[in-house]
């Protein structure tokens, strides 16, 4: 039986109440989402024996979310990933953004979507438990042009899928790029890291990067490289190849170009499996790319260890506003941006 449970989850520093909404599908799976940052706090899914465990990183209280952390479980925007030198030009006008990572702009700036309290509505429709979160980003917020209205629909289905649909409209030309920044470990009780997880990515190409993780502009073939994940590999085997590009970032932190990247149809982007629990996660998306980040710099002072979990961030390409041959991230008045990502959980046969 589908259910939605609402509970208080503390307050922000200015006293704004934060709530948690837990979606239950009646088949031993539940997802908890916070109105603060559109944050996925827990995803509990069964293993082969039917034992449900939380497979994403999260904090127990509101305070760590209010402080600096690596976007644990958060919704990222206005622009996920990086914009080179914190600036872009649109229709002849240059916009300057916060330079909050190695001289570049990353994940929406100092006070991105992950630091906002979203308005919530809930409902149960047919086979889905639905949480709608909405937020209006005012013109000039973090340096971005246009008043941007964003609606996110989270829906949990009875077949073990968590969907996220993003919608946005603007009153001025602007750039957008949203993603979910959940960190997955499919066997958290037995595996202290994700190195024995097996990963497949449906990508023939990836984006090489410079020393500050800005794409060089090339869509490079994965053939003969450590980035060839078209067949399943353990994360450890990827690390073992000692590729210079991977050593540079202490693991994977690269955008993969999905097949049919110019299509907005939902397609399989990645598959993650864990052999002991036999949990399986398939990621489907309408986005052209997926950033694979193996938790390379997770901070022990926050209670996490490097490579403890992996992010599979469906998105447009980093620095697209400055690289015109990448799929566009420009949104104009009268247009409606719609994007879908689906996390489908199951167990191995």
Image (cartoon, helix red, strand yellow):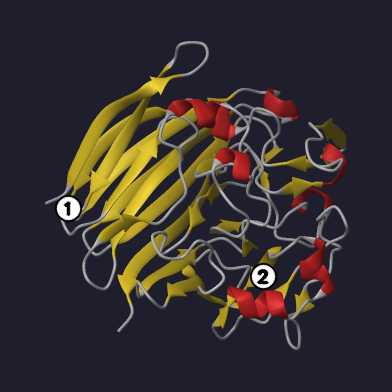
Q: Name which residue lies at 69% across and 37% down.
A: 174
Q: Quadrant of residue 132?
A: top left
Split into 4 quadrants, where in the image is the C terminus?
A: bottom left
Q: Position of residue 180 (x, y in %)?
A: 52, 49
- In the rendered image, which residue does mark 1 sit on? 126
**Real-space CA distance between mark 2 and mark 1, rounded to the nearest whole angstrom:** 34 Å
Residue 183 on image: x %, y %: 51, 53
Residue situated furthest bottom in the rendering: 224
Tell me which residue sits at (75%, 48%) in the image.
Answer: 82
Question: What residue sits 70% from the left and 65% below the top?
Answer: 251
Q: Secondary structure at mark 2?
A: strand
- In this view, the residue farthest toward the top is 14
Q: Nearer the viewer, residue 164 or 343?
A: 343
Position above or below: 321 against 266? above
The image shows residue 169, relative to residue 297, as above or below, that is above
Mark 1 and mark 2 in contact (Cβ < 8 Å)?
no
Residue at the limit of the structure toward the left, as seen here: 1
Give residue 267's mark: none
Tag in front: 2 or 1? 2
Instruction: Let me know if residue 227 appears in the view.
Output: no
Disc assigned to residue 257: 2
């Amino acid at each position: 039986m589908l259910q939605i449970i609402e509970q208080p989850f503390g307050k922000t520093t200015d006293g704004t109440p934060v709530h948690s909404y837990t979606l239950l599908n009646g088949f031993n799976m539940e997802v908890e989402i916070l109105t603060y940052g559109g944050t996925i706090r827990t995803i509990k899914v069964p293993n082969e024996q039917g034992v449900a465990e939380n497979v994403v990183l999260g904090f127990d209280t509101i305070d760590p979310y209010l402080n600096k952390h690596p976007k644990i479980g958060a919704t990222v925007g206005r622009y996920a990933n990086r914009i080179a030198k914190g600036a872009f030009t649109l229709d002849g006008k240059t916009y300057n953004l916060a330079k909050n990572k190695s001289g570049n702009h990353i994940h929406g700036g100092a006070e991105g979507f992950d630091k906002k309290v979203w308005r919530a509505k809930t409902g149960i429709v047919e086979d889905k438990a639905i949480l709608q979160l909405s937020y209006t980003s005012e013109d000039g917020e973090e340096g971005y042009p246009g008043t941007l209205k964003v609606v996110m629909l989270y829906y949990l289905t009875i077949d073990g899928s968590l969907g996220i649909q993003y919608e946005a409209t603007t009153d001025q030309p602007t750039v957008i790029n949203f993603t979910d920044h959940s960190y997955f470990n499919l066997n958290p009780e037995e595996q202290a890291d994700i190195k024995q997880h097996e990963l497949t990515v449906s990508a023939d190409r990836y984006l090489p990067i410079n020393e500050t993780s800005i794409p060089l502009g090339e869509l490079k073939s994965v053939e003969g490289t450590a980035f060839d994940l078209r067949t399943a590999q353990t994360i450890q085997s990827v690390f073992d190849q000692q590729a210079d590009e991977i050593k540079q970032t202490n693991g994977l932190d690269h955008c993969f170009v999905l097949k049919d990247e110019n299509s907005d149809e939902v397609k399989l982007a990645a598959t993650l499996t864990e052999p002991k629990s036999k949990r399986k996660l398939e990621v489907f998306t309408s986005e052209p790319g997926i950033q694979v980040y193996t938790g390379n710099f997770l901070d022990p002072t926050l209670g996490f260890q490097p490579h403890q979990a992996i992010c599979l961030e469906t998105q447009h390409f980093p620095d697209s506003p400055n690289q015109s041959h990448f799929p566009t991230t420009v949104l104009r008045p009268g247009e409606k941006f719609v994007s879908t990502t689906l996390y489908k959980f199951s167990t191995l046969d």
